[in-house]
Image: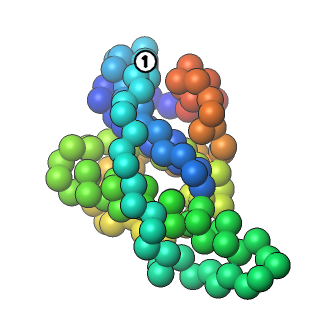
Amino acid sequence: MILPHGAIVAVVDGQHFRLLRNAGTESHAELAELPSPSLDSSNRSGTGHHSHPGNHAETAVSEDAHAIAAVDWLNAEVLAGRIERLVVIAPPRTLGEMRRHYRRETERALLREVGKEVSAASARDILAVLKG
């Protein structure tokens, strides 16, 4: 994948949110880690899950709330013009939840989505996932 200079790569899972930026060129991408924003994932009303004693729904609710908070942050950054080109990498389940909350402007900024768990991967490994 050709990754334009300045494109943002958001790596999200149920607990982590990492941001990287292509500080290189399109032909020679170089991902630089950016500070991770603080997210408020306390609003769980939009997740669509209900927790019952003895099941694992509470984990799903927390993970979905985190994914929604990440999308809310990305949507705000795109609307403010601070993100023009975006790549999202997330496990398939998280990615599915995120897609439900993208604004149209974020969808337009989106260059690619990758359904894979790479939150603990190095920038070099993340770049390899994008090239592969």
10 Å crowding of disc 1: few (<14), some (14-19), many (20+): some
Q: Quadrant of residue 36?
A: top left
Q: Is residue 124 above or below residue 59?
A: above
- Give the side of residue 91 with respect to residue 99, left or right: right
Q: Is residue 14 above or below residue 25?
A: below
Residue 69 visible in the snapshot: yes
Outermost left residue = 80
Find numbered disc 1 in the image and state the secondary structure of the residue it sits on: loop
Q: Is residue 88 above or below residue 95?
A: above
Q: What residue is rendered at 57% in x and 29% in y?
A: 126
Residue 23: percent from left, percent from top? 34, 20
- Give the side of residue 68 with respect to residue 14, left or right: left
Q: What residue is rendered at 34% in x and 53% in y?
A: 74
Residue 62: percent from left, percent from top? 58, 66
- Give the side of residue 94 with respect to residue 38, left or right: right
For badge 1, the amino acid type reads Glu
Residue 28: percent from left, percent from top? 43, 14
Q: Nearer the viewer, residue 128 or 93?
A: 93
Q: Is residue 108 above or below residue 29?
A: below
Q: Quadrant of residue 41?
A: bottom left
Q: Nearer the viewer, residue 29 or 55?
A: 55
Q: What residue is rendered at 62% in x and 33% in y?
A: 120
Coloring basis for residues = rainbow
Q: What residue is rendered at 36% in x and 17% in y?
A: 24
Residue 4 visible in the snapshot: no
- Give the side of residue 113 with respect to residue 54, left or right: left
How many tags in the picture?
1
Residue 61: percent from left, percent from top? 60, 71
Q: Which residue is mark 1?
A: 30
